[in-house]
Image (cartoon, grey):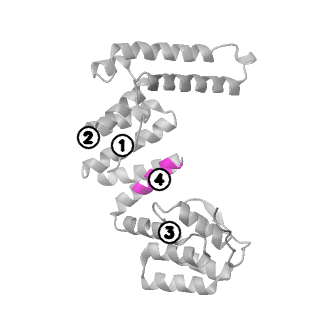
Amino acid sequence: MKLPVLCKGEISEKPYIFKSISIRVFSLEEICRVFMEHTSMPPEDFYCVELCDYISLELKLKDLGDALKESLMKKTGGQSEFIVRVLMYSGYADNVETEKIRKQISMLENLPPLLRMKSYADSMVSSGRLYGAFDIYNEILPKIKGKDPALEASIYHNCGVVYAKMFFFEAAAAQFKEAYVISRDEESLRAYKAAALFSDDDTENLIKERIITPKDAEEIGRIKEKILEGAAGDVGDIDFANDAKRIVKEIKKDYLKRIENGIISADIWGRQSA
């Protein structure tokens, strides 16, 4: 069990807002919590004069705020040292955790800016912040189109992952297909096939392209009919929420059956590294 941490400084009535992640904090410990949960790519508002001033003036920790501001103005230490200094001062993280964070941020600082952005977007997918990740991927794509095939393919693939997690299977299939055309990576092909199985894509074209077999197509048709039949009925007598739950349950059952039969991998989508 982790030892309790004594709070340092004041709890402010005025919040500091991390605009990049839409989070408000009122204390040093809350700042530390944000730092520890967003080490995959610390945004600019994790490392700025405004935060130093907030720590000095609002949290009444002038010694820490002034030291951070001085290191920031003199450009000594970088983001990793800035964040580690806050964590060590508060005692919020132990030495092992602090060193791990230092190494992680230092490694990211040495990556090219676009790879840093992709790393952050990937972490957002893992934590369920899909819309934010999608925005970042789409910001990167125009900058690398035709210039870095490996990175381009991995971003298309990961956009497919985002769409698939939101049940937009047709859009997911299109993204996976784009990734496969560029990279010829089997992971993207496998994900494309899985998305196509659950989409309303043109089955004849999928068979022609040898993405699915005629047997797959027949099975897809049966599954869709079964789900639609389950959803049909007198709308006036069926509560919409219960109906939606039943449909999701049918999809989950079908998904598990497909895994057991080896039709698709349990790790259907995956995420690619550039």
- Label 3 packing within 10 angstroms: few (<14), some (14-19), many (20+): few
Residue range highlighted in magenta: 119-127
Say what amino acid the circle numbered 3 marks. Answer: Val
The nearer-to-camera label among 1 and 3 is: 3
Task: Name the residue rendered at 50%, 16% in the picture.
Answer: 223
Indicate which disc, 1 or 3, sits on the residue closer to the N terminus.
3
Residue linked to disc 2: 182
Say what amino acid the circle numbered 1 marks. Answer: Tyr
Q: Does residue 223 appear left or right of residue 242 in this picture? A: left
Q: CA distance from mark 1 to mark 3?
A: 36 Å
The nearer-to-camera label among 4 and 2 is: 4
Residue linked to disc 4: 123
Q: Is residue 30 visible?
A: yes
- Label 1 packing within 10 angstroms: few (<14), some (14-19), many (20+): many
Q: CA distance from mark 4 to mark 2?
A: 24 Å
The nearer-to-camera label among 1 and 4 is: 4
Disc number placed over residue 272 in the picture, else none: none
Say what amino acid the circle numbered 2 marks. Answer: Ile
Tell me, yes or no, whether the two marked residues, 4 and 3, touch with CB atoms within 8 Å. no
Task: Name the residue rendered at 61%, 70% in the picture.
Answer: 92
Outermost residue toward the front in this view:
1
Q: Is residue 198 visible?
A: no
Q: CA distance from mark 1 to mark 2?
A: 9 Å
Residue linked to disc 3: 96
Above-or-below relation of 191 to 261:
below
Residue 65 appears at what percent x and percent y?
58, 82
Q: Main secondary structure of the magenta part?
A: helix
Q: CA distance from mark 4 to mark 3?
A: 22 Å
**Badge 2 element:** helix
Q: Does residue 194 appear left or right of residue 97 in this picture? A: left
